[in-house]
Amino acid sequence: MKHLIYWLLLPFLALFTIQCDKPPIDFEGENCIDGMPDFAPINTNNNEYDFSFFEDSQLSVQESDRIDGVEIVSGDRLVFQYEYVKDDKPNIADDEYTERILFEIPTELDSFILSGEDLKSSDAVFGAFCFCLDRGYFWINEGCIKGEKVNENTWNIAINVSAQASQRAFSVMLSEEFKKD
């Protein structure tokens, strides 16, 4: 009888051991911002930029062989959104351009650094919307995002990332205050 109990417990112990070996998401990745001479944030001092975060939200990413769409939906995380909308020139056809960066983090964090696998775990995406070949959302596959909570309504966020589309790579460097939406 004693051997039977051991044989019944063995699969559970093996499963527990396998799960314990899985690396946790620590949100303390490689810092590619502080002390980096190549980090040169863009000037965002105009009305073309929006920096927001959403409480009680999460990202819903629809995928097939590529990202088909991304939505901010109700959830238990913080979602950050950077958006740039280029001023439209009425005399030029099809010059509209919008870009977005979206990512999410657990609500209990007061600071974080996302890089490597943490970018994927945070559903970090870059979106380009234009009359162009490479449009839509793309996974952010290089760089890092650093954040520090200032207060309940403000986060300081620094972004140094790139995303690969089919024809080109998109990259963004910025350091801004994101406000609660």
Image (spheres, rainbow, N blue to C red):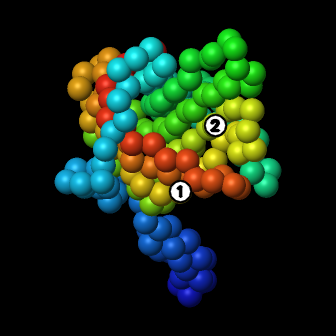
Up-down: is 93 above or below 117? above
* Residue picked out by circle 2: 128
The C terminus: image quadrant = top left
Rendering coords of residue 16 (x, y %): 50, 69
Looking at the image, tell me whether mark 2 or mark 1 is earlier in sequence order.
2
Q: Residue at x 63, y 28 (%)?
A: 97
Residue sitting farthest toward the left? 35
Q: Where does residue 138 sit, x and y in percent of width and height?
A: 64, 47
Task: Identify which residue, 132 or 32, lies in the foreground.
Answer: 132
Instruction: Give the residue at x 69% y 14%.
Output: 91
Q: For this view, does 144 lie left or right of residue 99?
A: left
Which residue shows up at 53% across the image and 56% down it?
141
Residue 141, numbered circle? 1
State left or right for residue 169 relative to residue 53. Answer: right
Q: Amino acid at mark 2?
A: Ala
Residue density around tag 2, few if under 14, some if 14–19, many if 20 or more, within 10 Å: some
Q: Amino acid at mark 1?
A: Asn
Q: In the drawing, does residue 155 fall left or right of residue 46?
A: left
Callout 1 secondary element: strand
Q: Taking 124 as reference, is 37 above or below it?
A: below
Q: Residues within 10 Å of mark 1 (few under 14, many from 20)?
A: some
Task: Tell us which disc is closer to us: 2 or 1.
Answer: 2
The Cα atoms of the two marked residues, 2 and 1, are separated by: 15 Å
Q: Quadrant of residue 92?
A: top right
Place residue 62 in its image quadrant: top right
Q: Residue at x 75, y 32 (%)?
A: 131
**Furthest residue toward right:** 64
Residue 172: x, y in percent? Answer: 45, 43
Give the image location of residue 171, x and y in percent.
49, 47
